[in-house]
Amino acid sequence: MHEFQLIDRYFSNLSVNNKGSFNLNDDVFFDKSKKLVVSIDTYVEGIHFINFKKPDLVMKKIIRSSISDIICKGVKPKYYFISGSGNRKTFSQSNLKKISVALKNEQNKYSIFLCGGDTVFSNKLSFTITSVGFSKKIISRNKAQLNDDIYVTGNLGESSVGLKILKKKLVVNKTLKKYFENKYFLPTLNLKLTDKLSSFANTSIDISDGLISDLEKLINKQKLSYKVYLEDIPVSNNVKKLIFKKKLNKISLITEGDDYQILFTAKPSKARIINKTANSMGIKISNIGKICSNLQKSQIIDQKGKKIALKTKGYLHKF
């Protein structure tokens, strides 16, 4: 049983009388009357991060991962709570100082404030972060429309390359090693896009589990499909060079997740305002495909116009 089957089977019925929970089929809770937006995420060593040798970078990564859930809804995060379980080694004075400094840096960068949390002694290192924002409206999932264009911000696949380097599955020079490791630990969040996103996006999600996996989650309660063009999926020049030199598979890189870019759909008539917003804000926004009728199967098309068969669509927690 995977995580979403578990939620559907045992917990979604507990939220049926609560509109703001979206039947537990979104990344946030939204109380419209209170203008309250809340998300929660748990991060476990060995699953969400390799180890705790760089506690400052791990903390920055999980903070950004958490507030990304709110940012992709067109909402600015305001507060966060953090709970952690660890032992004397992981929560040494040296590590705690690094954690504190890292959190302060993220607070200054994203204008967020720590409001509380909890600490527990355990030999299993984990953190849970609750992020809070306020807004009159949000961009929820499952609001895509037939013939919508599919867009993604930034570049994909860099975090995947960084993880391969950290796991010593890929060897590159020192400059590229530093570049990709930073992309893994320090994802770029498009905070300034929050004020504009709702003016053109019909539905949105952040890419945490992989492009295709998250695209399917985005429309999983709608009778729709998608067509995505591999050539249009944006990757950086550094990734392009590695794909060529190291024979890396582009489709594998963009389905491995941890990008934290915004994936959204919009009407074709919104193309001009999207391009104008991208240019004025200096944000890369790429049109990668189309929302289609469910009369045809979802597909990813390569440069030759052929359908690509996927080995995996993205990361999935299995129980």
Image: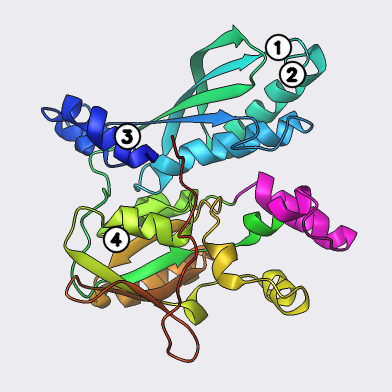
> On screen, 177 above or below 267?
above
Q: Nearer the viewer, mark 1 or mark 3?
A: 3
Amino acid type of the residue tagged 2 in the rendering: Thr
Q: Is residue 131 left or right of residue 176?
A: left
What is the quadrant of the N terminus in the image? top left
Local crowd size for mark 4, using a 10 Å CA cut-off: few (<14), some (14–19), many (≥20): many
Which residue ends up furthest to the bottom in the rendered image?
304
Q: Is residue 47 visible?
A: yes
Amino acid type of the residue tagged 1 in the rendering: Asn
> Magenta segment: does it hold 52?
no
**Which sits earlier in the primary sequence, circle 4 or circle 3?**
3
Expressed as whole percent of the image width and height from the top left, the position of residue 167 reads 76, 48
Disc 2: which residue: 90
> On screen, 195 above or below 23?
below
Nearest the viewer among 49 and 57 is: 49
Disc 3: which residue: 6
Q: Which disc, if any, is residue 87?
A: 1
Q: Nearer the viewer, mark 4 or mark 1?
A: 1
**Which sits earlier in the primary sequence, circle 3 or circle 2?**
3
Which residue ends up furthest to the left in the rendered image?
17
* Residue drawn 59% across the image and 37% down it: 48
Secondary element at tag 2: loop
Secondary element at tag 4: loop
Disc 4: which residue: 201
* Residue drawn 64% across the image and 56% down it: 160
Task: Please provide the residue range marked out in magenta.
Answer: 163-187
Amino acid type of the residue tagged 4 in the rendering: Ala
